[in-house]
Image (cartoon, rainbow, N blue to C red):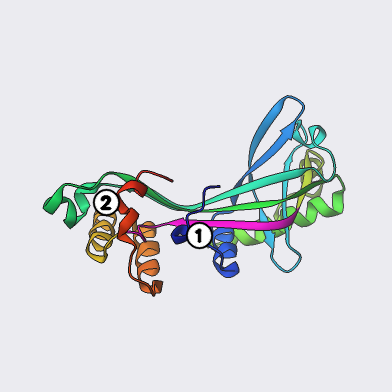
Amino acid sequence: MYLPKQFTESRVEELHRIVRENSLGMLVTKTATGLEVNHLPFLLDADAGILTAHVARANPIWQEVCDGDAVLVAFRGVHGYISPSWYPGKHETHRRVPTWNYEVVHAHGTIHVRDDEKFIRGVVARLTRQHEAGQPEPWKMGDAPPDYLAEQLRNIVGIEVRLSRLEGKRKLNQHHQPQDREGAIFGLESSGNHGLAQAMRDTTQEASQPPDTSTQQDSQLRS
């Protein structure tokens, strides 16, 4: 991943936050027929450095990978289009162009297939607890008839990714002047993208160095 210094996110707590808040990851694997991408909800065990998920038994990916193969899981956080019309500077010089702001984490590691009932049941239970927590009446595995649940569990296979490193990128107009960042934040809020607006506001508050304007124009289009 291309990582300009001003967009690099190396804080572990931020990387973990992005993964947990955006748990549908893109699992990228290399198979005999080429690259494959599967979209799976992952659980992060930060202490163990492990991502867990499951796939349908009918999905051939679990048979196409070898134990210990290198894989990548990409997690995308808030993102959105930035119009140059939102920048006050555009109306002064017209030297502004469109761009796309975003947060992303790339999780590198090795894949391990776990085709055992205890592991699979545990993954499903933890996923359920995590995603049902906000429901008025959370569904739990015990709500389903045991024979039906057992049948469903037989139809999935567990996946474990043992992490070797995390790469993070937060491209949030850090290279722009404060008035242009504020203009973009206002534009995002007006268009309903409050999550990206807040991420940009947080980044502005975190910044301790003045923006580098020497490369502003030629870096706006690069992601």
Q: Residue at x 77, y 27 (%)?
A: 32
In the picture, the disc for residue 8 is: 1
* Residue ranking furthest to the front: 214
Rendered image quadrant of residue 38: top right
Of residue 91 and residue 38, the one placed in the foreground of this image is 91
The residue beneath circle 2 is: 191
Of residue 185 and residue 220, the one placed in the foreground of this image is 220
Q: Is residue 139 visible?
A: no
Residue 212 screen position, x and y as percent? 34, 62
Residue 26 screen position, x and y as percent? 61, 43
Q: Tell me: residue 24, above or below residue 209.
A: above
Q: Tell me: residue 40, above or below residue 7.
A: above
In the rendered view, does 169 fall on the left or right side of 141? left
Disc with the residue nearer the chain's start (1 vs 2): 1
Rendered image quadrant of residue 65: top right
Q: Residue at x 36, y 73 (%)?
A: 205
Q: Which secondary structure lies at badge 2? A: loop
* Residue type at numbered disc 1: Thr
Q: Residue at x 34, y 54 (%)?
A: 215
Residue 100 screen position, x and y as percent? 37, 46
Q: Which secondary structure lies at badge 1? A: strand
Residue 158 screen position, x and y as percent? 78, 46
Crowd tier of the residue under label 2, counting other residues whose Cα lies within 10 Å: few below 14, some 14–19, many 20 or above: few
Q: Is residue 86 visible?
A: yes
Of residue 63 and residue 71, the one placed in the foreground of this image is 71
Q: Which residues are magenta?
A: 162-175
Q: Residue at x 73, y 57 (%)?
A: 164
In the rendered view, does 3 fall on the left or right side of 123? left
In the rendered view, does 209 fall on the left or right side of 3? left
* Residue type at numbered disc 2: Ser
Q: Main secondary structure of the magenta part?
A: strand
